[in-house]
Amino acid sequence: MENPLSLDLDHILNHTQGLWEEIRGQRLFMTGGTGFFGCWLLESFAAANKTLGLGSSVLVLTRNSEAFRQKAPHLAVNPAISFLEGDVRTFSFPDGAFSHVIHAATDASNSIGGEDPKLVFDTIVQGTRRVLDFSKACGTRKFLFVSSGAACGRQPPQLTHIPEDFPGRPDPADRPSAYGKGKRVAESLCVECGNRSGIEIKIARCFAFLGPYLPPGSNYAVSNFLQDGLKSRPIHVRGDGTPYRSYLYAADLAVWLWTIMMRGKAGAVYNVGSEKAICFADLARITARAFSSDLEIVIDGKSNERTPPERYVPSTEKARSELGLSQEIDLEDALARTIKWNLIQGQ
């Protein structure tokens, strides 16, 4: 049976030509391999490994390999992908050398507002320290840390696009900002480790995304809108619909992450996301049209013209100018592909 992601995987391979030779015959290590980012990295790794005959392998740290087997059985049985059961904060170091490490643990969808703030912070910081120690012990050459735009704190409404050198920080008194605070500290740990160890550490500061493997109904507006549409019910906008986000499709995300790890400058931070801002109300309307139906849109609140809309939109000029990266798949196409995949999966 044809892989429902075949179009996306072709897109990724077409836009990562020339990157893969450096991992030919190598062993990779990954945390967070069972989350949204991890599934896309594993899908693209598996496709490149097979298509190009790389003879590479990846060991994935996970707390529950059986849950992943149910989620992505075709990846779980891939002979190039194996699993190490353990907690990112305390896992036992596997034997042997690993040339590349991707630290993508602690997904925002599972961390913002859903857990004890101290646990979220400690998991990010202690887990990053543990993975860095492992990387030094196993001879890693390149290390990718998947961070978050939440590390920048609240974006001033007058700033349309937030750059990597924005001096803001998460508010230390804001308990729900534990995720962003943890990512900020983890970024510092990565930079310091790179300076001391010589490992080429690159930081991908990720914003908002859309695509298969993003669970409908998670902590993101777009996933809630998709869940409403998939259930043929009114699309519900919680709030006044004025906050701005921008969405990069998952296939583009995979291209960006692999490119940053392979070609990014050591010690550099790169924003990852789309620069095309859209408010929640307009996103709801576009999502309704993507379902080719007359879905009703319900907006809870009324906007206050005296209050500037909240924004969470990155500047990606650095990734564009240094690495030649760009958004290739627009929002309408991204929604259509995500809806199709969810329908195939029966969600």
Image: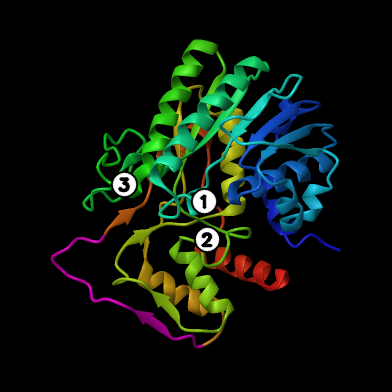
Is residue 118 within the magenta segment? no
Q: Do the residues under discs 1 and 2 have CB atoms within 8 angstroms?
A: yes
Q: Which mark is residue 330?
A: 2
**Position in image of residue 99 (x %, y %):** 69, 22
The residue at which mark 1 appears reads as: 327
User: Marks 2 and 3: which is nearer the front?
Assistant: 3
Residue occupying image coordinates x 54% and y 76%:
290
- Number of other residues with Cα within 10 Å of mark 2, as a class: few under 14, some 14 to 19, many 20 or more: some
SS for dot 2 = loop
Residue 288, percent from left and from top: 49, 79
Q: Foreground residue, 174 or 168?
A: 174
Outermost residue on the bottom side: it is 294
Q: Marks 1 and 2, Cα distance to the nearest angstrom?
A: 7 Å
- Marks 1 and 3 sit apart, C-alpha to C-alpha, by 33 Å
Q: Which residue is mark 3?
A: 175
The residue sitting at 61% across, 33% down in the picture is 102
At a point 42% along the width and 69% down the height, the residue shown is 283
Q: Amino acid at mark 3?
A: Arg
* Three-letter amino acid code of the residue under disc 1: Gln
Res 57 → quadrant = top right
The total of numbered circles placed on residues is 3
Quadrant of image for the N terminus: bottom right
Kind of residue at disc 2: Asp
Q: Earlier in the sequence, mark 2 or mark 3?
A: 3
